[in-house]
Image (cartoon, rainbow, N blue to C red):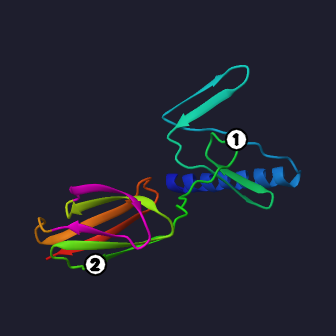
């Protein structure tokens, strides 16, 4: 037997013994307890009479998954599971931008469920912001006209957002 075969044989033996140990622990009904461990670039712990604070740096997402009696907790510093996600603004809105391609004036007709303030930014193809306007109290069927006569021929992006930036629409505008 050469050295490589000895290594493979030893790996198989260690794997087999680990499997036997696990089966033995499960068959006699003992719980296997793992203590939590974290590898982080920073962290700390502090406590007073009323509260304690423990934190780690670099933990992006935590969640707990369970199936039957098996529970897997991902993340280290969690006392309870909180979900994160994107919540939509309750207003319903749509915008018609016409004519597109445009020569001089672009019209934006708003179809919204309630009056709202909007932020509009025009960007060139490189992402440079060319105009930035806030329109307060836009109502159902309001039409806002943007003067594009000073813009050269090309492709532009019009970003229309609620002023709290919870909803955004982006239009590709073709200037003739």
For this rendering, which residue is in front, 156 or 92?
A: 92
Seen at 45% across and 60% down, the residue is 116
The image shows a total of numbered marks equal to: 2
In this rendering, is residue 44 above or below 120? Answer: above
| Residue 117 placement, left or right of 156 | right
**Which range is magenta?**
127-148
Seen at 37% across and 70% down, the residue is 142
| Residue 163 placement, left or right of 44 | left
| Residue receiving disc 2 | 98
Which quadrant of the view contains residue 66? Answer: bottom right
The C terminus - image quarter = bottom left
| Residue 154 placement, left or right of 23 | left
Callout 2: helix, strand or loop? strand
| Residue 65 placement, left or right of 163 | right
Q: Residue furthest top?
A: 49
Callout 1: helix, strand or loop? loop
For this rendering, which residue is in front, 128 or 18?
A: 128
Dominant SS of magenta comes to strand
x and y, in percent, of residue 121 in the image: 28, 59
| Residue receiving disc 1 | 79
Tell me which label, 1 or 2, sits earlier in the chain: 1
x and y, in percent, of residue 37 in the image: 63, 38
Which quadrant of the view contains residue 78? Answer: top right
The answer to whether residue 139 is magenta is: yes
The N terminus - image quarter = bottom right
For this rendering, which residue is in front, 43 or 149?
A: 149
The label shown at residue 148 is: none
The answer to whether residue 57 is magenta is: no
x and y, in percent, of residue 162 in the image: 42, 58
Residues at circles 1 and 2 in contact by the CB criterion of under 8 Å: no
Seen at 26% across and 55% down, the residue is 132
x and y, in percent, of residue 117 in the image: 41, 58
């Amino acid at each position: 037997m050469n050295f490589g075969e000895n290594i493979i044989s030893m790996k198989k033996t260690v794997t087999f013994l680990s499997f036997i140990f696990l089966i033995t622990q499960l068959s006699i009904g003992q719980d296997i307890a793992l203590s939590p461990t974290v590898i982080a670039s920073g962290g700390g712990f502090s406590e007073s009479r009323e509260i304690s604070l423990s934190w780690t740096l670099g933990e992006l997402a935590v969640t707990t998954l369970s199936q039957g009696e098996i529970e897997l907790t991902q993340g280290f510093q969690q006392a309870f599971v909180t979900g994160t996600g994107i919540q939509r603004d309750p207003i319903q809105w749509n915008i018609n931008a016409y004519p597109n391609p445009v020569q001089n004036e672009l019209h934006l007709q708003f179809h919204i469920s309630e009056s709202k303030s909007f932020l509009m930014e025009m960007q060139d193809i490189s992402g440079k912001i060319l105009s930035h306007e806030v329109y307060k109290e836009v109502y159902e069927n309001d039409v806002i006209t943007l003067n594009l006569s000073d813009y050269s021929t090309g492709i532009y992006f019009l970003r229309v957002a609620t002023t709290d930036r919870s909803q955004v629409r982006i239009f590709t505008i073709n200037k003739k």
